Image (spheres, rainbow, N blue to C red):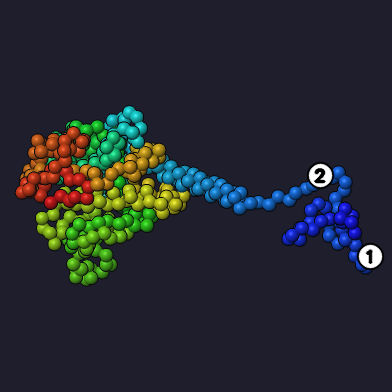
Amino acid sequence: MARQDKPYRVYRGGRAKGKVPALPRPDGGPPRGRPPAAAGAPRVRRRRLGWRRGLLLLVFLLLVALVAWGVMGYLAFERGVERANARLGNSARAALVPQDGLLVSKPTIVLLLGTDHAGNIPGRRDARRADSIQLVRTDPRRNRLAFLSIPRDLRVAIPGHGFGKANSAFPLGGVALAIETVRALTGLPVNHVAVVDFGSFRGLIDAIGGITVDVPKPILSNRFDCPYATAERCRDWPGWRFGRGKQRMDGRRALVYSRIRENRLDPGESDLTRAQRQQDVVQAIAEKLLGPRTLARMPWIGDEVLRPLATDLTAPQFLQLGWRKVRADESRTLHCRLGGAPANVGGESVLIGETDDNLETLAMFRGRAAPQPPPRGAGPFAPGCVVGRARFG
């Protein structure tokens, strides 16, 4: 057969060039193979999804899922914030000093009040007192956070009520009077406030899966909040024990750690030591809240994490504070405290603060003076500041 008479050409690999005609069957049945296309008909090509397009589609679907997850988490968190805002009285909002600009770029001061009774939050009178008083200051320019503890027994001027302990302002006039008392004592504008109900503190820590706290030294506490149901077992129970070093704590144990007033292994500890432990717990909670596991669970626990709080902070402001916490250099974090000398006034044990020493500590807290720890031999209640993970002596 001549070359031009061949119906098609076969090349290496068995592939044919051009159209392949259908081959007749010996039994007279329909021809094998695909029938030839009609003359002039357009050729239809079957497209296959390449691996690159498949990968792009997978990435796109993952991004859509992450965005949906983030929106769900934010909405749950926002609902919790709205309820926390509703728990704060209008008088407390009126006592705050408005802030210019965004929290992410402007310094701000937040007052943290800890109480054992949720009934104190709306601002009405109550027999309970503020268990913890702290100021938190953000410093965006230096990427630094500063904490200032105010001893609950520090004798201060309470506007409209004379002199008394710092924590007595809370039952006398609620959150609003506590804000005014702190402002009169420190001369600092309080821009925001957050009231923490320690009664619900345990649920918050359990909701985020516990926290990790670095305990600086062994503790054997006095016997309070006995874990046993029978009086006989509680009588023989020595007290709460905490070893030295990093350890994971659930809600109950973290709450106990922050409440310890007496360490029988170190009689030199004071109420200021207890305030330092509370700062450690608060920072551990903040770190856990910003962790990837907590953020992944936010659609389910967004409302739960705000349940112990009454605050004026909005959801966007919380996010800005979280960003400042992420950006802050932990090695430069300031831990400051006001202090004084023990005294007895009217049969009540109080701390009488040295005005000059406390003013100097306030200057350190504001970043206007170099941080200095309390002088050696100045006593367990002396004011001062330490940097990073350093501890008060």
At mark 1, the secondary structure is: loop
User: Which residue corresponds to mark 2?
Assistant: 42
Left or right side of 206 for 237: left
Q: Amino acid type of disc 2?
A: Pro
Q: Residue furthest front?
A: 2
Question: Which residue is located at x 56 percent, y 47 percent?
Answer: 60
Q: Is residue 250 above or below residue 282?
A: below
Q: Amino acid type of disc 1?
A: Gly
Q: Is residue 33 above or below residue 194?
A: below
Quadrant containing the N terminus in the rendered view: bottom right
Residue 258 at least partly seen: yes
Left or right side of 10 for 201: left
Question: Which residue is located at x 88 percent, y 46 percent?
Answer: 39
Q: Quadrant of residue 239?
A: bottom left
Q: Are marks 1 and 2 in contact (CB under 8 Å)?
A: no
Task: Give residue 288's position: percent from left, percent from top.
Answer: 35, 52
Task: Give residue 253's position: percent from left, percent from top.
Answer: 28, 59
Which of 126 and 163 lies nearest the eye of the viewer? 163
Q: Quadrant of residue 191?
A: top left
Which of 170 and 12 lies nearest the eye of the viewer? 12
Question: Which residue is located at x 26 percent, y 34 percent?
Answer: 190
Question: Which residue is located at x 16 percent, y 38 percent?
Answer: 370
Which of 302 and 122 lies nearest the eye of the viewer? 302
Mark 1 or mark 2, earlier in chain? 1
- Residue 28 bears which disc, if any? 1
Q: Measure how far apart labels 1 and 2 are at the Cα level.
A: 30 Å
